[in-house]
Amino acid sequence: MNSQKKKLLEDNYEKILNVGFCVIPYEDLSEIIAPNPMVFGTTKDEKVVSYEGVEALFKSQFEQMGDMLPSFNRDRIATRISNDGNSAFIAEEITLTITSPEEVNTIFMRVSCVMEYMDSQWKFTHWHASTPVDTENDHWHLEEWKREKEKLQKLVDEQTADLKSKNRELEIEAALERVRAVAMGMKKPKDMLDICQIISEQLQQFGATHIRNIQTAIIDEQKGIYLCYQYFTPYDKEAVERTEYLKSRVEHGMVRQMLASKDGHFTGILAGKELEEFREHRKTEKHFPDPLLDEAKEISYCFLSIGHGGLGLTLYRPLDAATLTLFQRFHQVFSLAYQRFRDIELAQAQAREVQIELALERVRARTMAMQDSDELAEVSSLLFQQMEELGVSTYSSGFTIWGEDRNHLISWMCNADGSMNPPFHMPLVENTWHKEQYESWKKGEDFLVKELTGEEMKAHFRYLRSFPLLDEAFKTSIAAGHPM
């Protein structure tokens, strides 16, 4: 083959290659493509046996390339020329790089081409391209199948895990919605117990075990107490407990942590001396009996703070990360329940204040209408009635006036059934309680509280019953079912 014929072969091959890979603009190649070429590309549809098919393939490739920019690196493997110099076989390895505004992709392929010299022109008659798999000595692609299977299994595992995660998230959201629904249905503060119970139930649904209780602590710093609404899971029992936390180093520490953050959380473990102190304080406060706590070596806890209180979880086992994370999800929805609780408390306090003011006004009006001291009996009876209507369990109420000689008092008192006794005189010097009342009056004190218990209370009632009038009243009261 002379040099001119050889150069023509290379020029025509280069043109086919550059047009076929869209490196140069598309142009008509009918002069250098045989009428019935055979083209086999790297995709399933790239199987062509006519010039029209090759032309359609090239045009489709240019259209799909769009604004992407192709380039390639080539490595010539072989060039074979027939003995008569009219047939040529060319084989190459090509790395095609396609650059788009977003990314860069590469394709490695092996190509082979047959050119035939006819009518004083080298023409393209056969083309084959393939993309080899990334294995060696794997003639039947077994390693490739294994790799694809592993990739598929990994994809299935990832999608299964994602599906499980999404299902769990939906289940958690459903659990939160159940708690939210109970919170919105609260009618009275004691309904907070329902919140504690449903949170316990939802935690158990997600596998939380050995739950001791769910509790809501409402802190009153001025009084040094907190009110604790609790659901004890193992006993299926509710309890509302009043705790003087200043008497317990352990509980005082918990209160300080709750007050330290409006929406934080803290965890801890009670064991050894601290656990024993906690047990003893509960017994001193006469709290809900908890035999499992008496047997426990340690308990763990978590509190989600809400400023002046918190939502608490205690366990008879160490608190694991999964349970903690799940419990924290109830923080926001519990804040809703706590706000609802506060709103109900405020509404009840306001309603209570109105009730008290109305009761005071009734007593005040009757007092202002008095014409003489004997009408104190009616005022006393009305006072008793108003106290009962306000929910105060009252045994007796009335008025006492010091005698002019300051050695006796005149008393207008009603009985346990609300009936009035006639006014009666009683010496001031014979009874300690009456003397204390008098001394308080002399000091100008507006308010005096006295709690009688045990023998002191019995002695007081014995003294009262020493007066025939009162003794008869007590007998009538007892007969009517009002015990002393």
Image: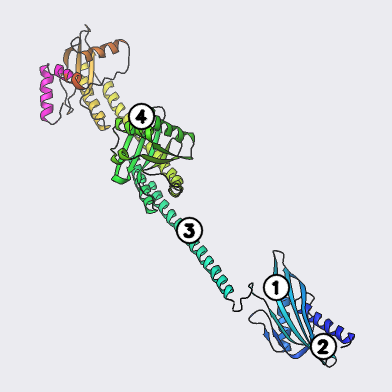
Look at mark 4 in the image and give the residue it sits on.
Answer: 244
Query: Main SS of the magenta segment?
Result: helix
Mark 4 / mark 2, whichever is N-terminal: 2
Quadrant containing the C terminus is top left
- How many residues crowd around disc 2 within 10 Å: few (fewer than 14), some, or many (20 or more)? many
Residue 458 vertical placement versus 280 (above, below): above
Query: Which quadrant holds residue 427?
Result: top left
Of circles 3 and 2, which is in front? Answer: 2
Q: SS of the residue at dot 2? A: strand
Q: Which residues are magenta?
A: 459-484
Of circles 4 and 1, which is in front? Answer: 1
Look at mark 3 in the image and give the residue it sits on.
Answer: 165
- Work out how far the residue at label 4 is from the one at label 2, CA to CA, in angstroms: 105 Å
Q: SS of the residue at dot 1? A: strand
Residue 188 appears in the rendering: no
- Residue 316 at x, y percent in the picture: 36, 43
Look at mark 2 in the image and give the residue it sits on.
Answer: 122
Query: Which quadrant holds residue 145?
Result: bottom right
- How many residues crowd around disc 1 within 10 Å: few (fewer than 14), some, or many (20 or more)? some
Give whichever of 170, 122 is nearer the camera.
122
Q: Are marks 4 and 3 in contact (CB under 8 Å)?
A: no
Which kind of residue does numbered mark 4 sit on? Glu
Mark 3 / mark 2, whichever is N-terminal: 2
Q: Are marks 4 and 2 in contact (CB under 8 Å)?
A: no
Instruction: Decide if residue 143 is on the left or right side of residue 198.
Output: right
In the rendered image, the residue lying farthest to the front is 137
Look at mark 1 in the image and give the residue it sits on.
Answer: 108
Question: What residue sits 59% from the left and 73% below the top?
Answer: 144
- Residue 452 at x, y percent in the picture: 23, 21
Give whichever of 139, 332 is nearer the camera.
139
